[in-house]
Image: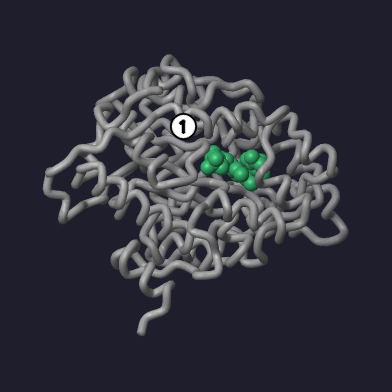
Amino acid sequence: MSSPADFQNEIYLRGLGDVVPELPTDLTRLEALAGRRLSAAAFGYAAGAAGTEATARANREAFDRWRIVPRMLRDVAERDLSVRVLGTPMPAPVALAPVGVQSIFHPDGERAAARAAAAVGLPYVLSTASSYSIEEVAQANGDGPRWYQLYWPKDRELAVSFLERAAAAGYTALVVTLDTFALAWRPRDLDQAYLPFLRGIGVANYFSDPVFQKAVGGPVTDANRDAAILHWAANFGNPSLTWDDLEFLREHWHGPIALKGIQHPDDARRAVDAGMDGVIVSNHGGRQIDGAVASLDALPPVVEAVRDQAEVLFDSGVRTGADIAKALALGAQAVLVGRSFVYGLALGGEAGVTHVLRCLLAELDLTLMLSGHARIADLGPDLLVGT
Ligand SMILES: Cc1cc2nc3c(=O)[nH]c(=O)nc-3n(C[C@H](O)[C@H](O)[C@H](O)COP(=O)(O)O)c2cc1C
Ligand SMILES: CC(C)CC(=O)C(=O)O
């Protein structure tokens, strides 16, 4: 006789894959469990946000203001969740958001998460601020789809080196994060004096770069480690960048480019004018500007501004399959999930990340089916009513 977990998999997940029975399928409870298992500092770094964390809360509240209006008798026996975004065929419109320093959550860090992403077939977006090198993560990701996220450093030669390494290692699209050229006021980290990268934790990708090494006088060892960390901190972001600088990226990256951190429709239009392929509506999970507009509220005006000219992706606050359906209905072509997969990584490494992704996809599939939609393209504003 099958166990309750088998029954659950069979009935609710319908072949979408195994979950880890010990881990909650409600990802908000997964967060609470991660809070009990991780050190206070590491959990605070993941769960925390800027200032009073008003924007992080607003990100969630914005989802609650939309309700789904299901439709009946529409033959939803067969469903297709697949999409193509930034040139990448995907089994469902979900990617793993770039998250830095993943080794603070699990020793295998980005490698474990990239393996899980490949197993489920969803794009893994590697942060520039990664604990393993571009090449190590590509190897773990194998044949899985992968995109590279650039934190555009002051040193242009270093930026080019990252882009060339990423292209050579099979990352097919570039995500350029614009909202974090400086780290925000984050009280949880400040109060715990916890910024892992300032201790050299999690920035191995920089340390492994030949241009970075040249700048610090050779490979990073105990002898030049402090100097390397200072060089990293001085170079991490560039507040002087302007829209004109995007031309430089176009010269050095030959695949699709999406700008991450767009919240204003005029910025989305400028991205299109600059020849970008996509924008990611995001407020960095509320981690940058306390009081910034909820990401879901920023989405419809951006979609309205650049519909048919650029792909619009979305992140910040996604915790459920229903959240994903809402963002898609409001015009996103795909969503990225951040903290949700981080908690899975913290609690179960690769299997924990797979668990989270399977749960999200299964719930998305059920939401589509029960609301009377057989394909992702069928989702539109008429799915929702504002409350
Ligand atoms: C611990 C942590 C580290 C992050 N590191 C990066 C990063 O290196 N690059 C980046 O573009 N975004 C980074 N982000 C932001 C995510 O890509 C994403 O925008 C955000 O997590 C989405 O919100 P969510 O966590 O509510 O899903 C980070 C987020 C978290 C929680
Ligand atoms: C290494 C960091 C800059 C990662 C980040 O973007 C974040 O903590 O939000």
Judge whether residue 64 can be spotted in this image: yes
Q: Which percent across, then down, holds residue 343?
A: 59, 55
The N terminus lies in which quarter of the figure?
A: bottom left
Give the quarter of the figure containing the C terminus: top left
- Kind of element beneath mark 1: helix
Disc 1 marks which amino acid? Asp
Say if disc 1 is inside 8 Å of ligand 1.
no
- Which is more toward the observer, 275 or 372? 372
Kindly give the residue lying farthest to the right in the view shown: 223
What residue sits 69% from the left and 40% below the top? 48
Rendered image quadrant of residue 326 = top left
Q: How is the image coloured?
A: one colour
* Coordinates of residue 364 in the picture (x, y in percent): 34, 49
| Direction from residue 72 to residue 220 in the image, left or right | right
Determine which residue is flagged by label 1.
64
Q: Is residue 208 visible?
A: no
User: Which residue shows up at 36% across the image and 40% down it?
Assistant: 256
The percent coordinates of residue 218 (x first, y second) are 75, 56
Measured from the top left, where is residue 104 in percent x and y?
Answer: 70, 57
Q: Nearer the viewer, residue 221 or 339?
A: 339
The total number of labels drawn is 1
Q: Residue furthest top?
A: 266
Q: Image quarter for residue 50? A: top right
Query: How many C-alpha atoms fall within 10 Å of the one at disc 1: few (<14), some, or many (≥20)?
Result: few
**Quarter containing ligand 1?**
top right
Name the residue: 58% across, 67% down: 348
Vertical arrangement, residue 277 with respect to residue 341, above or below: above
Query: Residue placed at 60% from the left, 32% from the top?
Result: 56
